[in-house]
Image (cartoon, helix red, strand yellow):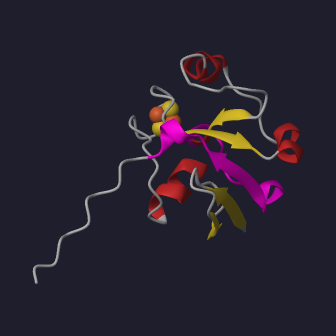
Amino acid sequence: MYLTVRMPDGTTHRLEALEGWRVMEVIRDWGLPIKAECGGACACATCHVWVGEEWVSKLVPPSGEELEMLDGAFQVDARSRLCCQIIMNKDLDGLEVELAPESLADMPEPIAVGG
Ligand code: FES
């Protein structure tokens, strides 16, 4: 199954996902720069994504804890979720999410090649 992620710079990435994986883990394990500071404990809101509108109703609704954390995020709307709380299953094959800018991790500085 696949997950499509749109990054704040507008690039999109189609990532293979496995059943039972958290969307945050799929994004992180494929090497895309997601902050996800608490590692998936629903305690940071730095894994905020906007879910494609047609997918919102297919997801398990957010828990009270998730809603509380989302309260502290920026640009929250009806499509906002913490992607560490979305667990991939067959019904979510093709899921589309957009990473919120504040969830983007700083990229390491490129190593300068001396010349
Ligand atoms: S990684 Fe911290 S709330 Fe999702």
| Residue located 70% across and 32% down the image | 80
| Residue 12 magenta | no
Q: Residue furthest bottom?
A: 115
Q: Is residue 44 left or right of residue 111?
A: right
Q: Position of residue 59 (x, y in %)?
A: 79, 40
Residue at (10, 84) in percent of width and height: 115
Residue 8, image x and y in percent?
58, 50
Is 74 or 54 nearer to us in this picture?
A: 74
Magenta region: 84-104
Q: Residue 64, how many percent across, how many down?
A: 65, 16
Q: Residue at x 80, y 47 (%)?
A: 52
Is residue 76 shown above or below 35? above
Asked if residue 115 is positioned above or below residue 20 in the image, the reply reads below
How many marks can you see?
0
Residue 22 seen anywhere in this rendered image of the structure: no
Left or right: where does residue 43 sit relative to residue 69? left
Q: Examine the rendering and report whether any part of residue 58 can be seen.
A: yes
> In this view of the protein, which residue sits in the foreground, 61 or 82?
82
In which quadrant of the rendered view does residue 13 lie?
bottom right
Q: What is the x, y in percent for residue 75?
A: 64, 27
Which residue in the rendered view is the most extreme toward the left? 114
Give the quarter of the figure containing the N terminus: bottom right
Q: Nearer the viewer, residue 64 or 75?
A: 75
Decide if residue 89 is on the left or right side of residue 8: right
